[in-house]
Amino acid sequence: MNYSWQRQLIIETIQKTKEHMTAAQIYQLTRKSCPHLSLGTVYRNLNLLVETGKLRRIGVPGEADRFDWELTEHQHLYCRQCKRVSNLPVSTEKLSELVASCPGIKAESFNFIVTGLCEDCAGK
């Protein structure tokens, strides 16, 4: 993959915020430092960064995909109240064993997302 300043700006924005943002949120933040950047450029570069393993895509049911800078195996919580996605400390080993125990399938990968309330929203 060749160097692209747009791609570099996108990945730096995601890493700096440490949030699981949508493409639209990433677009809004990157436009602050680069007003002529287009939404199409952001989408194309996000897809390329996911394809090349530089970012992870998180599918949130009923919501826009989010993008994750952290590449180590981990799972996520989607808060139905504040709409944030956060890392979930679930044992990947135990989850892998559970998926492997499903009869009749050969799983190649999995994404586990819990929907509920985050610590902040649950405490309100």
Image (spheres, grey):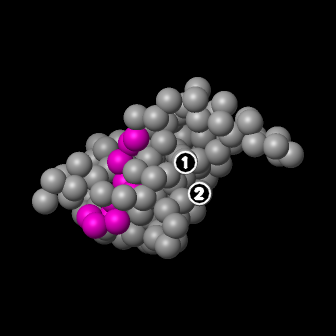
Taking 84 as reference, is 50 above or below it? above
Which range is magenta? 78-88
Task: Name the residue: 44% across, 47% down.
Answer: 76
Q: Amino acid at mark 2?
A: Asn
In the picture, the disc for residue 47 is 2
Furthest toward the top, the residue is 93
Task: Name the residue: 61% across, 53% down.
Answer: 48
Asked whether the beta carbons under mark 2 and mark 1 sit within 8 Å of each other, the answer is: no
Between marks 2 and 1 in the image, the one whose residue lies nearer the viewer: 1
In the picture, the disc for residue 112 is 1
Taking 44 as reference, is 39 above or below it? below
Res 45 quadrant in image: bottom right
| Mark 1 surroundings within 10 Å by alpha-carbon count, few (fewer than 14), some (14 through 19), many (20 or more) | some
- Spot occupied by residue 109 in the image (x, y as percentages of width and height): 69, 42
Element class at badge 2: helix
Taking 61 as reference, is 13 above or below it? above
Furthest toward the right, the residue is 104
Residue 83 drawn in magenta: yes
- Spot occupied by residue 62 in the image (x, y as percentages of width and height): 49, 73
- Spot occupied by residue 97 in the image (x, y as percentages of width and height): 66, 30
Q: Is residue 89 visible?
A: yes
